[in-house]
Image: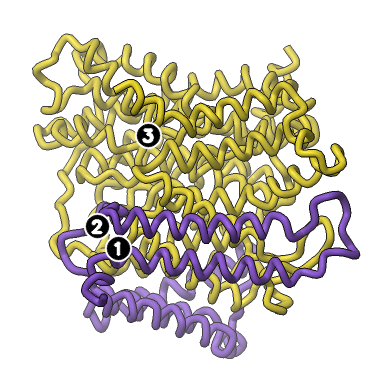
Amino acid sequence: MTERLKQHSELWVCAFLLLLGGVVLVDAISIPANFTQRGPVGPKAVPLLVGGLLVLVSVLLAVDVLRGGKGEAEAGEDVDLDAPADWRTVLLLAAAFLANIVLINLVGFPVSGMVLFWGSAYALGSRNHVRDPLVAAGLSILTYVVFNNLLGVHLPGGPLMGVL
Amino acid sequence: MDTLTQLLNGFGTALTPVNLLYAVIGVLLGTAIGVLPGIGPAMAVALLLPVTYGLDPTGSFIMFAGIYYGGMFGGSTTSILLNTPGETAAVVTAIEGNPMARKGRGAQALATAAIGHFVGGLIGTTLLVLLAPFVASVAVDIGAPDYFAIMLLAFIAVTSVLGGSRIRGFASLLIGLAIGLVGLDEMTGQQRLTFGSLQLADGIDVVVVAVGLFAIGESLWVAAHLRRKLAQPIPVGRPWLGREDLRRSWKPWLRGPLIGFPFGAIPAGGAEIPTFLSYVTERKLSKHKDEWGKGAIEGVAGPEATASASAAGTMVSMLTLGLPTTAVAAVMLVAFQQFGIQPGPLLFQRESALVWALIASMFIGTVLLLVLNLPLAPVWAKLLRLPRPYLYAGILFFASVGAYAVGGEVLDLVILLVIGLLGFMMRRFGLPVLPAVLGVILGPNAEQQMRRALQISDGHLSGLVNTTFSVIVYAVIALILCWPLLRKFRT
């Protein structure tokens, strides 16, 4: 069974579609539609349709996969499909992204953005311990100033910008 | 003559110093970002959305026109110098463009591409000026059932015409439709898929979805398979064309737009098919058949002019029907909605000044592109050497800025990451991204139109097919759906 799952890892997509369809259907059924409904079609109809089709497509895709159908992984300029997937890099990137989410309202964008950029560059293999943080800090502060002061798009400055 | 007056007024708006500056910034930013490997025009426009939040609508759309054209031209530079097209429209360019560059004729390849873009953009935009008001005036009379039919056509076309697998296209579309359901039902105010969260009741912002699927998904996907040994770009000087090259290029430049424009206007996947058709046509008409595959200049000139004209064609259906046919148009539609403007037949009446300024700036953009990019080509080529860790860290950085700037909500960043991971999964398993984006953008609108149509007909399903227009559209849909069966039958 595990062997089979490994070979047909695309079945995870079917599982995801099935789960998503299930969530949409359960949510649709629980909508109390009777009293506010305007017109013959209420708020339930389309979610029921979308959820039902998701379940149907997940089954059809599973059949396709088991018959040997395969989704083609996307190629690209910097993509080397012959190499195995590098999960460590992906996890490190996600961690850097999460750090930004946690930090942005605590210490402000200039610092959290620097952590995000430096962390991502590190995850992707850059190991220049002088240039990397400098580029990160420069980009982060410049972006803050341009967006906040020139373009009028507010970003949280945090305690650091409060001091300056 | 009315059109001409309005167009001249548009030029009047677009040529004020401030707006001209926006156009220049747009072209430069768009080219710079389009040249960067891994960033196609759709991602370029999505990443640059937040830059325009603080501007007035006119200024920001003038900038967008520049970004769009700049991004497309930037993509062909990567194709020619690196042999790695950043987007589907530039795939064909690489076939002849890269061999030209390897033979030391990179400068000529870039020049014929740039002038091809200029000619294609000029012809395409002229056709847009002639056609769009007419289409809009016809479309003013169409009602809810017609809109629903058109949107259904867009869904079916994008899942069936593009990509190798229909079932995967439909899966992607349904994921998008499910995301589009989140929030309050517009007609009754009922909560759907909000799980009791107040922030989710506002719905998931389309910008967050687009940036997540395009930028975050792409970065994570590239990170998982990052090429350790990078392809080296071919060094290039200032682009120029000799007399012989010019003689061979001018006919393909003029033929390209005739193929590109109509394909751009219909929902058939943008520039992918017409650029290929242009390539095949030029190859058939060429007197230098032995050169093909080794760097025939016609194979760069034709497809580039085609791509540029198809971009203008895309604008016809986007502006007059509110129907995006490519990923870039989808993101542009989002930009319109950000300003509370709904593209459609009424746009030419309600926002006439804005639309004509946008169209005028498309002309200005094509001219700027030629004037700026011919001398700047060696500078752009240097961008190809940017270290990849910085490039993808930068994409993640600006994607976060963009998502946060939408509403100042940390939750948007969480959603951005989740949708990014979804985009990663879709790339890994070959689900196309465009149907999902289209589903999120058009899904809610399609639902409203359908319910409105059924409200009018008092629930009878005939209310969806009671106009000639909608019947024709359904016939086209049936044809697209049955096409594979018909082909099987013939062979």
In front here: B236 or B407? B407
Q: Which residue is mark 1?
A: B222
In front here: B400 or B165? B165
Number of callouts: 3
Q: Residues within 10 Å of mark 2 (few under 14, many from 20)?
A: many
Q: Colour of chain A?
A: purple
Q: Position of residue B17 (x, y in %)?
A: 62, 40
User: Please, which chain is the residue tagged with disc 1 on?
Assistant: B
Q: Colour of chain B?
A: yellow
Q: Which residue is mark 2?
A: A78
- The kind of secondary structure element at disc 3 is helix
Q: Is residue A70 visible?
A: yes
Q: Is residue B56 visible?
A: no
Q: Identify the residue shown where x is 43% and y is 41%.
A: B70
User: What's the distance in space between the residues labelled 2 and 1, CA to CA?
Assistant: 6 Å
- The kind of secondary structure element at disc 1 is helix
Label 2 with label 1: CB-CB less than 8 Å: yes
Residue B444's place in the image compared with A156, above or below, is above
Q: Amino acid at mark 3?
A: Glu
Q: Identify the residue shown where x is 30% and y is 59%.
A: A66
Q: Identify the residue shown where x is 81% and y is 69%.
A: A32
Q: Residues within 10 Å of mark 1 (few under 14, many from 20)?
A: many
Q: Which residue is mark 3?
A: B272
**Which mark, by number, is residue B409?**
none
